[in-house]
Amino acid sequence: MSNPLTAGMELGRKAPPVALVVFGASGDLTSRKLLPALAALSRRRQLTDAFAVVGVARSDMDDLAFRKLAAEAVPDADPEWEELVKGFRYVQGDYGHPDTFEALHAVLDEVDESRGTNGNRVFYLATVPEQFGVVAAALDKHGLARLAPGHFGRLVIEKPFGHDPQSAAALDATIHSAFDEDSIYRIDHYLGKETVQNVLALRFANAIFEPVWNRQYVDHIQVTVAESLGVGHRGGFYETAGALRDIVQNHVMQVLGITLMEPPATVDAQGIRDEKVKLLKAIEIMDEDQVVTSSVRGQYDAGWVEGEPVIGYRQEEGVAPDSTTDTYVAMRLAVDNWRWAGVPIFIRTGKRLPKRVTEVAMSFEKVPHLPFASALTRDLEANSLVVRIQPDEGVTVGFGAKVPGSEFRIRTVSMDFAYGAAFIEESPDAYERLLLDAMVGDPTLFIRSDEVEQSWKVVAPVLSAWEAGDVPVSRYEAGSWGPRQADRLIEAGGRRWRRP
Ligand code: BG6
């Protein structure tokens, strides 16, 4: 198996012959992410001619209509994509009906014949979550899941992986009855982001960062996943999720895993995932009292974002007028292990914040003794190291420097590494990376079932205490940095949220 963290650089890394079966082919994810990602892979010659997409959905379409949809999803398509799309097929049907899977079986046999896809399949579940188990079970029942030796059948599944620990376990049981864990590729698209992978390079390919990456030098850590967008047309879905389930249970936990884990023995699927799960197990599980003192749930009211007036969450389409769904979460977490004992980890995520920015910021301890008059160091902040995950990808180190002049004044300055300036290569979209990995068969950047289970264990007590009404919903104005309670959460320990 090739190593995905270097394999992107390997010349000629290509998908093997394979049919990619997309359930939910008429949906938003397919048009917005999957088809453009495939077009980019085709442009980079990372798909062979022995490739086909078979779309499955309930929408009334035929092969031609699906090809048109695929062409339109990629406005700047090149002739190769147009050629590839001509081989795409569509199966219309209900996921609960055997006819759908019999028709799919027949189409896949035809595609093997006409495109040379060789009996290899990647099944991508881009459906609503309620259908995940239904589709997996039906694939098994119709002999599509477990293939003869020499062929592969993999299942790619999108979050949410369950709604709570119990439903996640039930979903896992259904999927495992059809596919082995080795053939299940659970996507967290944050792991496909270059900058998240760069945390591994930063930590383990350099001598200067890892020695200070621990409780002796780090005062606290802040993880921010801020979005300026509201819930848009996803109000109906969002009402059943909320920010804790939508972002914290998955994206934030994965970013924490990569950032705080121990160095893996090997940078491969087992090495990295073993270390991530160990880290997740070290996150302290809060009791009810801790949830009250260490978590903030917020919901946005009307306000202004990026110069435009926007409505409040309760006025969004598909949202109950008295909804208590969280669109903002802030929490203080503790990681009970040798490396991080006593270092508070502050996380926050929210919709309708002032800007879209995701970052991990380490704030370092003060020097043991500052041999300057205090008036001269008024503008000196603690050293910091900020991994800017998006949109302005890079790394910033903040440190003190002497202000030019006859006085010895010291002020914080920053040293920046920006992806855009340092490399001419463009970062591939996360989905390009992950789709190719699933086709090639490399699970390193996908989530293992024990990671899902452990992330739920961290989040579940917070959900239950919230649902029991222990933590009131705090309101915040759209376009602000969240509710005041979140400021109090961090300020209680004498620290402040960064304003990225
Ligand atoms: C998704 C969430 O997983 O991530 C969305 O369901 C959110 O609500 C999105 O907007 C954010 O992803 P990104 O890549 O834009 O940070």
Image (cartoon, grey):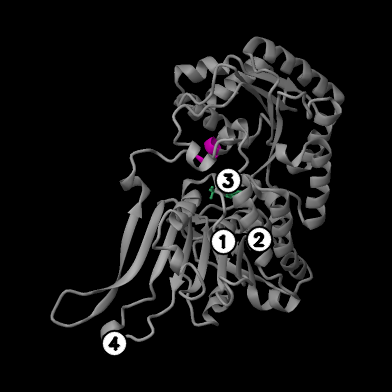
At which x and y percent is residue 114? Answer: 65, 10
> Could you classify mark 3 by the number of other residues whose Cα lies within 10 Å: few (under 14), some (14-19), or many (20 or more)?
some
Q: Is residue 152 left or right of residue 30?
A: right
Residue 464 is labelled as none
At which x and y percent is residue 393? Answer: 41, 51
Q: Which residue is outermost to the left?
A: 406
Q: Amino acid at mark 4?
A: Pro
Mark 3 falls on what kind of element? loop
Mark 4 or mark 1, whichever is nearer to me: 1
At which x and y percent is residue 158? Answer: 67, 42
- Extent of the magenta region: 429-433
Q: CA distance from mark 4 to mark 2?
A: 41 Å
Which secondary structure is most common in the magenta stretch? Answer: helix
Q: CA distance from mark 3 to mark 1?
A: 14 Å
Q: Amino acid at mark 2?
A: Lys
Residue drawn at the location 54% of the way across and 67% of the way down: 482
